[in-house]
Amino acid sequence: MILLPLSKSNEKKRVKTPTIIQMEAVECGAAALSIILAYYGRIVPLAKLRQECGVSRDGSKASKIVGAARNYGMEANGFKAETLEQLDELSPPYIVFWEFNHFLVVEGFNKHQVFLNDPATGPRKVSWDEFDEGFTGVILTIEPGEEFEKGGRKPSMIPLLYQRLRPSLGAIIYCIIAGFLLVIPGLIVPVFSQIFVDNILVENRTNWLRPLVLGMTIAMILQTLLTLLRLRYLRKLMIKLSVGMSSQFMWHILRLPVGFYAQRYAGEISDRVNINNEVAQVLSGQLATTVIDTVMIVFYGLVMFAYDRVLTLIGISFAAVNILALQWVSRQRVDANMRLVQDEGKLAGASIAGLQSMETLKASALESDFFSRWSGYYAKTVNTQQQLEVTNQVLEILPTFLSSLTSVLVLVVGGLRVMEGELSIGMLVAFQSLMLSFQQPVNTLVGFGSTLQELEGDLNRLNDVLSNETEAEGRRQKAEEEAEGRRQEAEGRRQKAEEEAEGRRQEAGGRRQKAEEEAEGRRQEAGGRRQEAENISYKEAEGRRQEAGGRRQEAENISYKEAEGAEKTDIGETSQLTKLKGYVELRNITFGYSQVDPPLVIDLNLSLQPGQKIALVGGSGSGKSTIAKLICGLYQPWEGEILFDGVPREDISPTVLTNSLSMVEQEIFLFGGTVRDNLTLWNPTISTTQLMKACQDAVIHEAVMALPGGYDGELLEGGANLSGGQRQRLEIARALVNNPTILVMDEATSALDAETEKMIVDNLQSRGCSCIIVAHRLSTIRDCDEIIVLEYGEVVQRGTHEEMLQEEGVYQELISSKS
């Protein structure tokens, strides 16, 4: 594409769109659409647009964004511009595709620069050269259509704050009451100052001095005690909020589905955990104080009015300037803070990724390249911090300047009022003291407003996590939807059955009439036969009765021991329900990572008997690992069901599943700690015997015993003091610790030599557990009971190794490429 400079004579008016920062690494398209909709008055939660735009682990497509926009009554179209001059014909805002990996909103332009609203960073401006370099030519125009309706409500901070403060309302109310009591000494001191000047100094009433000093001392002691009590409870409140919020947040994170983590930076998620402490400090320290300060402003204002209205208006005017200044920089501060927390999360993620890949970086001599990338993230973070500091400095300097100016004006105007006889000198001194007391909560209120603007971004990031459904909630919602579907289906069947029953009832009426006539004839005929039947031999009937009595006695004499044995057998079978037998069945499984894209796995059927091995093979992206994760419950299928021992997964206790099913993934996770902790994951019920048996079957026992401390020896982060094969065998041992009956292995032996791999396979065979194996190596799959060949999520071949070698197909090509 050839891009030409834009005609500078035809300038477009800039529009200002709301700032909406993307929470996931790949949801820029959904966030850009959210910005456009909000600009036109339709507020849609980003989580909802995330689904409607089909955001998956690969992001979203322009066609999906256009389709989602049309669902809201927008006229949306996409096209490719050949030159920049075509932008002259468009009215902002619109979405452009940037650097082939990002969507952002164009707000307008002038002769020198283009104004952008970037979902990753917020509003920014770039030069025409920079825009020319990043612009790919793809444009999405989105404007209100005839069916468009405004609606929705901008998320408010109040519900988010109340949700966190609700468990601690009692402590907060206590702190507020203590703060109100502090107003009393604050009001008494100016009155004492007035008495001291007017009555003691001017009127020379020296006998008032001692009571006055005593009163001021009591007021000071009372103020100190109340302050100490308030601070003590605020500290307790902060600890309670911090512990409660962090625990709730971490527990929620642990129960989220795997898809949540696939689309976010690990460092950014961990950074959100720490945000809870900062939020707790603000809520416990500043929020209660601000409520008190707001009331104190009213109290002090009323008392000041009682002294002098003119001087009071001067103080209120400068307080209003303070608040207006806060409002003036509010959007800049909110935008800058949201950018800052995002940039800090990305910086933390980049740092963690670099440290985890240190061996690769050094082996490839890529330290300088990584440092350049890290420096870019760091520079962006520092720049955002500087932008935020500019507004911070304004809000720090302005209150001090206005307070000084207010004091000067109060002295000047107050002096004139004293000379006019409107005020006494003591009243002026008291008013000056009241003004200082009035300005302090005003400045505190402005400072809290500044903090609250910064807090908004933090609360949005926390709420982004907490608003995601946990796995249990997702399963419950799916079950409710299925139950509703079955209920409606049953209602339809019932209605149809009633109609059919009515038809049969009418038909039966006719048949009954006819049957009654026939029955009358048979009744007369039966009268004669009954007389004949009554003459049956009494002896014959008595013999049959005795024979029946003998059979009944024989039935009652069933062996007690046999019944007791049957009871014991039932109890024994019940006690074994903590383990599945190993039957696995997939029925018509369909699944994909985005509901608006074609599924990745299509109508898959699979059946596995206890002790059998099934291999999943295919090229990259064929869906092998996805199927393995579906079996393990990491993802939920769109259609179909997964059964264990003939029972749907949803009907099996999670405890039974975790005791029976284990998975060995491609990526090996070992943390800094003992070998025992790495294998048991802190489960105290796993015995040393189980641990050693698992390691022996994984052929790692001798290597563990060779470590200093054996099973209690320390592993470095990532198992850096082990070889790649040893790390992989530890991962296998971890999966075997619970003695699973079903084992899913995703490239679990790729780092092992053939001899070690065979030993592990033989040990697994002796355990008798069912195995689903994802692998490429011929030695791993050739002895499997069935091999399933996948291509684009569909089964193209299945059978044994020998059977499929005899026929031409994908499997034969895969084997040939490996040999």
Image: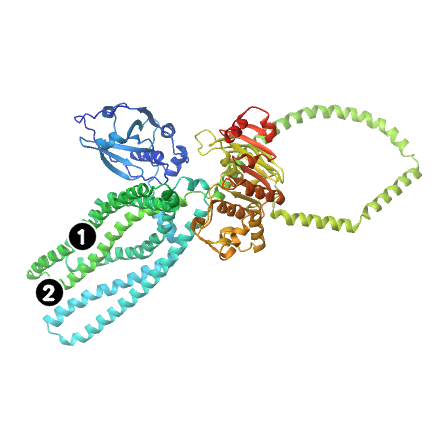
Expressed as whole percent of the image width and height from the top left, the position of residue 488 reads 54, 33
Residue drawn at (78%, 51%), measured in percent from left and top?
560
Q: For residue 173, which numbered disc appears in the image?
A: none
Can residue 650 be spotted in the picture? Answer: no
Specify few, some or many for label 2: CA neighbours under 10 Å numbering under 14, 14-19, or 20 or more: some
Judging depth in this view, the residue of 68 and 306 nearest the camera is 68
Q: Which mark is residue 397?
A: 1
Q: Nearer the viewer, mark 1 or mark 2?
A: 1
> Which amino acid, by three-letter code, is at mark 2?
Ile
Task: Give the amino acid type for the residue marked by disc 1 in the picture.
Answer: Ile
Which residue is pictured at 16% across the width and 69% down the height? 195
Which residue appears at 25% of the width and 58% of the height? 296
Pinpoint residue 576: horizontal percent, then vertical percent: 64, 48
**Residue 66 position (above or below residue 422):** above
Residue beneath disc 2: 425
Q: Nearer the viewer, residue 780 or 464?
A: 780
Q: Residues within 10 Å of mark 1 (few under 14, many from 20)?
A: few
Residue 407 sits in quarter: bottom left
Q: In terms of image quadrants, where is residue 497?
A: top right
**Quadrant in which the N terminus appears:** top left
Where is residue 424, by image quadrant? bottom left
Left/right of residue 569 with respect to residue 289 in the rendered view: right
Q: Dot 2 lies on which element?
A: helix
Dots 1, 2 in contact, CB < 8 A: no
| SS for dot 1 | helix
Left or right of 468 on screen, residue 420: left
Is residue 138 among the parts visible in the rendering? yes
Distance, label 1 to label 2, CA atoms, is: 31 Å
Percent position of residue 354, x then y: 36, 45
Q: Position of residue 370 (x, y in %)?
A: 32, 42
Which is more toward the observer, 202 or 682?
A: 682
Which of the two discs, 1 and 2, labels the residue nearer the N terminus? 1
